[in-house]
Image (cartoon, helix red, strand yellow):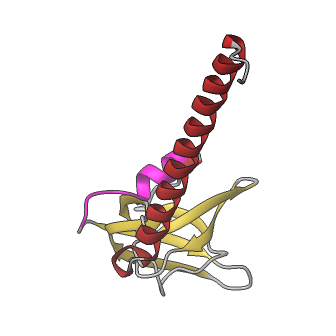
Amino acid sequence: MPHNDPSAIARWRTARRLTLGAIVVAGTMFTAAAVAQRVAEHPCHASARVDSYYTYSGIGVELTQEGDHFVVSRVFRGTPADGKIYPGAVLLEVDGQAPSDMLDWTRAIRGDIGSSVELEVVYPCQGHELVSLERALVRVRH
């Protein structure tokens, strides 16, 4: 007749509970991973992207300051400035005024959609140019 040790039975029950608990946790994690994989591979979700845009009303240029000069560093495609102003253009005036800092330049070239703005620009090795643009909604992905 086997010896019935109450402490051995208690240890066995504890070990059984821990083992069954681990099996349940592992099964839950496996199931969650399988569901996530199916969702990710589903044709409706495979091409889904979340794009973030910054929108404003303006002409579609990015400016940098080089010493005392404000220079167009980038022109966004499909914006009013696209094909009319080019990177490297030094901005001299906007609507007859010469803003003194980046914030003033930004405020001056932005405005209501459909309003016009005239920029005086100069390119290295070229003369001055007046560029008239109509402000539009600009969407920049970030």
Q: Nearer the viewer, residue 20 or 35?
A: 20
Q: Residue at point 58% right, 80% down?
A: 86
Residue furthest to the left: 114
Does 81 sit left or right of 113 as displayed?
A: right
Residue 38 in the image: above or below residue 109: below
Q: Residue at point 39% right, 67% down?
A: 139
Residue furthest to the front: 1
Does 65 sit left or right of 36 as displayed?
A: right
Does 3 sit left or right of 23 as displayed?
A: right
Residue 72 visible to the viewer:
yes
Residue 65 in the image: above or below residue 127: above
Q: Nearer the viewer, residue 5 or 30?
A: 5
The picture places residue 137, in percent across and down from the top left corner, at 31, 66
Please report the bounds of the magenta region as a residue range: 103-113
Residue 80 in the image: above or below residue 112: below
Q: Is residue 118 magenta?
A: no
Q: Nearer the viewer, residue 31 or 124?
A: 31
The picture places residue 132, in percent across and down from the top left corner, at 38, 76
Residue 99 visible to the viewer:
no
